[in-house]
Amino acid sequence: MMDFLEDAELDTLAIRAGIQRGPEGEHSEPIFTTSSYVFKSAAEAAARFAGNSPGNVYSRYTNPTVRLFQDRIAALEGAESAVATSSGMAAILSTCMAHLQSGDHVICSRSVFGTTTVWFTRYMEKFGVKVSLVPLTDLDAWRSAVTPKTKLMFLETPSNPLCEVADLGALSALAKQANSLLVVDNCFCTPALQRPLELGADLVVHSATKYLDGQGRCLGGAVVGSTELVDPVLAFIRTCGPTMSPFNAWVFAKGLETLRLRMEAHSSNALKLAEYLAARPEVEKVFYAGLPDHPGHELAKKQQRAFGGVMSFRVKGDKAAAWRFIDAVRIMSLTANLGDAKTTIVHPATTTHGRLAPEEKQAAGITDNLIRVSVGLESPIDLIKDLDRGLAAL
Ligand SMILES: *Cc1c(COP(=O)(O)O)cnc(C)c1O
């Protein structure tokens, strides 16, 4: 990184980190849509292939626009290194393929993105990795799940959709004791609100598809941490190919410029909606760590800069009532995606968490009357009017 940026604040890094201007002196970041690169001589080609000369060879290995995004997200997470991937799931896959082998044991929070659970239980187990699922906030359960073979612990905080908050400091201490890596999916907070590496995590993974883009345009991911731990992931990606496209990298790099402003606005809008719903008699319970009666409130205040944009609530009534609410809103989009400028609403029990068995849903608190909202950047005045349409339909 440029020396004048070494002690820069997050807002400056989000806009300046990773820039390497070309001979044209372009001010804004260009997109390099090229699969390969020309060498000046046979000797230079040989040196680049041998890794003895800086510069690009092929875009599955390196690409200037992808490097820009990698440098910027690494700077924001306060990390030495980052590697970009074609999606958030590719970031999780590549981390596991680089750092696990048959016979290893993984402990994963029960409250992670549904596809992440499928990845660990269906695919990792198929290749001989044993997986234990534990409740996110039950430190004793994490402790008793540790075995001599535990190599990786995986979690998201706050969780989706109930906003439970994990104690990152305590879990990283446990991981160190167990000689295991702690990998945190920082998708919901982003480095604008939470920096897990500072609290002792070893690697951060991202679905850039969500808040890093922030406008729902493309898929991507990243793995962030020390060079020692990121390099094996990079080697896997170079070999196996879940690479980020230069266009997507450009979208994400530009998205990062407004990340903190957006995350603060998402958080402030979400708090307004959560407070509004919590005061309504038609609502049974609101799950948002920004509310003082949420069990994760104090911890979230300590380890996050704000409470984030995702919240959920249970209406008084059954599945039909929840569906009537969802069908009555007009501004909010009915879609499973989140982390968008556009507010989205979804019924977890029949969509994002629909694959869970009834008892798993019960254990995870995914009741039929639960609704999740990813609060966007529209005016909270209009969003509350939209909630009123839902409430009136109950
Ligand atoms: C969406 C999501 C993922 C998967 O990311 P993709 O980009 O869709 O592959 C992983 N973790 C969390 C928390 C997510 O919300």
Image (cartoon, rainbow, N blue to C red):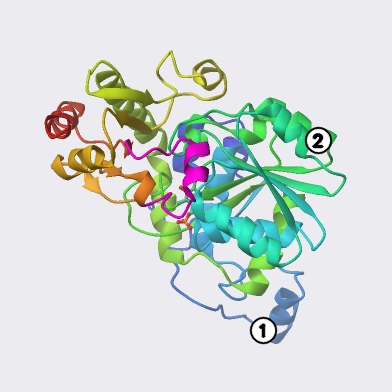
Membership of 29 in magenta stretch: no
**Where does the image place residue 88, in percent across and percent down from the top left?**
51, 55
* Front residue of 203 and 74: 203
In the displayed orientation, state which residue is furthest to the bottom.
42
* Mark closer to the chain start, 1 or 2: 1
Secondary structure type for disc 2? helix
* Residue located at (57% from left, 50% from top): 71
| Disc number placed over residue 176 in the picture, else none | 2
Q: Residue furthest right?
A: 148
Which secondary structure type mostly characterizes the magenta part of the structure? loop
Check the image and report above or below for 198 versus 237.
above
Which span of residues is magenta-colored?
351-369
Give residue 153's quadrant in the image.
top right
In this rendering, is residue 360 above or below 198?
A: below
Query: Three-letter amino acid code at disc 1?
Result: Ser
Against 138, residue 180 (above or below) is below
Describe the element under mark 1 as helix, strand or loop.
loop
Q: Viewer-proximal residue, 278 or 179?
A: 278
Q: Nearer the viewer, mark 1 or mark 2?
A: 2
Say which residue label 1 marks. 41
